[in-house]
Amino acid sequence: MRCLLIISFGGLIGCTDFPDVGGQITQSNAAAPYPVLQPLEPLLAKIDALDTTNAITAASVVNMNNRIVSLQARAASLRGPVVEPAVRARMRRGVAVPAAIR
């Protein structure tokens, strides 16, 4: 049973057309130099310089409360109907089902 499964899987793989990715690279990209690797130490120094105590301060509480109020206002504005009632009524009047279909 396993042998049959392996053979059928191999047959499926053999029938696959692989995309030609070689033609998508331009000559200028192929001749371009490799990017220069940047040292990691300056980035780590910037992280160490930040205040990463994660302490809750009065300023962080005010900032978070302002963000909460802003997000709640955005959510409230999205709760309205997608199609306004007047437009929905006009759409319903415009669709008349023929008697032959009813």
Image (spheres, helix red, strand yellow):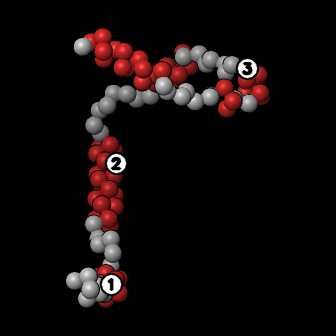
Separation of residues labelled 2 and 1 (CA atoms): 51 Å
Separation of residues labelled 3 and 1 (CA atoms): 63 Å
Do residues under tags 2 and 1 come within 8 Å of each other at their CB atoms? no
Do residues under tags 3 and 1 come within 8 Å of each other at their CB atoms? no
**Dot 3 or dot 2, earlier in sequence:** 3
Name the amino acid, label 3. Answer: Pro
Q: What element carries label 2?
A: helix
Residue lying at 49% horizontally and 27% vertically, measured from the top left? 16
Q: Is residue 100 left or right of residue 40?
A: left
Q: In this view, does 3 lie to the left or right of 39?
A: left
Residue lying at 37% horizontally and 28% vertically, measured from the top left? 52
Q: Residues within 10 Å of mark 3 (few under 14, many from 20)?
A: few
Quarter holding the C terminus?
bottom left
Residue lying at 42% horizontally and 24% vertically, measured from the top left? 12
* Foreground tag (2 vs 1): 1
Q: Circle 2 sits on which residue?
A: 63
Question: Residue 66's x, y, as percent?
Answer: 33, 54
Q: Is mark 3 on a helix, strand or loop?
A: loop
Dividing the picture into quarters, in which one does residue 97 lie? bottom left
Separation of residues labelled 3 and 2 (CA atoms): 45 Å
Q: Is residue 50 left or right of residue 17?
A: left
Judging depth in this view, the residue of 88 and 101 nearest the camera is 101
**Dot 3 or dot 1, earlier in sequence:** 3
Residue 58 visible from this viewpoint: yes
Q: Please say if 42 is above or below 84.
A: above
Q: Using the image, tell me which numbered label, if any, was put on residue 95.
A: 1
Do residues under tags 3 and 2 come within 8 Å of each other at their CB atoms? no
Q: Circle 3 sits on which residue?
A: 33
Name the amino acid, label 2. Answer: Asn
Q: Residues within 10 Å of mark 1 (few under 14, many from 20)?
A: few
Q: Please say if 60 is above or below 9.
A: below
Judging depth in this view, the residue of 101 and 51 nearest the camera is 101
